[in-house]
Amino acid sequence: MSGRIVVLTGGVGGAKLVLGLMQVCPPEDITAIVNTGDDFRHLGLAISPDIDTLLYTLSGRASAAQGWGREGETWSFMDALKSLDGEDWFLLGDGDMALHVLRSHMLASGETLSAVTARFATAWGLGLKILPMSDDAVATHVSTDAGDLPFQRYFVEQRCVPAVRAIRFEGAEQAHPAPGVIEAISDPATRAIVIAPSNPWLSVDPILAVPGIREALAARKAPVVAVSPIVGGQAVKGPTAKLMGELGLGVTNQAIAAHYEGVIDALLVDVRDGGKGLDIPHAVTDTLMKTLDDRARVARAALDLAERIAG
């Protein structure tokens, strides 16, 4: 079955699924819409963590141990920064700095984040289309029992320890979808839209908060399938399970389905949890993505579910 595949993604789990999709579909058929609510300015540099994680993963440059950052990274810059008593809570590797410096330079020269991201993807021969959710600044802020924290302060500096009370996306109401985002979702040639097993609240909700994107998803013709981030009643990586508990939710696929109500048509869940209690169409597979074959398997299962929904 041919046609465009659109994937909403953020974080390490999302990048793994996009890599899986590239194993089962021609890369030129894939459009990845990436969370930029994590983006921030640090030491004068424009940092786009989820875009960079995707670029590193798809180009084979990601750290195998961490899933983020570059394999074989060196830290001379950080060592020099620490010697000057500079802020060292957010690690900037020497190779990583190339993306941040060049991105910052291009943005300061008037380029959009979309154009910068496309240039990087082309330079590394990735083949697929990578779109930031918006070229406008949208910043995720987390209200916690330790106060209001910008996302990276919560996620990196505080290591997700403070209990979360609420989440907001500063600037979202004024933001516009990046060029190509609405077109990809609405394209009659799009055969499936997949929501990656990214954190629904911290990685996917910022995308849905940009005016026009949720509405386009509601009006689209292609089936929308979400891959649950829950495996065996827990999250594989990151604060998803902890966050759900703090928001008063059970760590269940039912809670994931309810969160995406009105957006998705079906949910792909892990075999350890099964589909018991789900009242939407679903399929079951092993959703752990440790190897490239695993990632391809999960991608194929998501597309098979979408095809089943499409009839």
Image (spheres, helix red, strand yellow):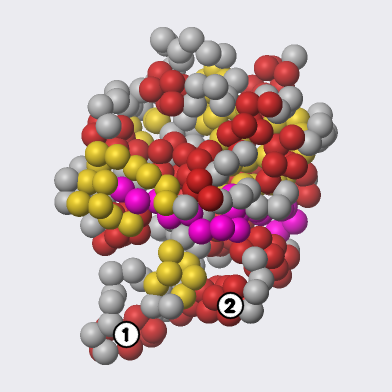
Write the start and end of the magenta stretch as one range. 126-142
Is residue 147 in the magenta section? Answer: no
**Which is nearer the eye, 205 or 310?**
205
The disc labelled 2 sits on which kind of residue? Ala
Q: Residues within 10 Å of mark 1 (few under 14, many from 20)?
A: some
Look at mark 2 in the image and give the residue it sits on.
108
- Which residue is the extreme one toward the left? 145
**Which is nearer the eye, 157 or 292?**
157
Q: Could you tell me residue 28's position as x and y percent?
A: 78, 49
Horizontal side of 130 relative to 145 (left or right) equals right
Q: Residue at x 57, y 41 (%)?
A: 211
Q: Could you tell me residue 94's position as x and y percent?
A: 46, 79
Q: Could you tell me residue 296's position as x and y percent?
A: 62, 39
Q: Residue at x 50, y 46 (%)?
A: 173
Look at mark 1 in the image and give the residue it sits on.
81
Q: Residue at x 23, y 85 (%)?
A: 85
The disc labelled 1 sits on which kind of residue? Leu
Please say if 47 is above or below 129: below
Horizontal side of 182 relative to 45 (left or right) equals right
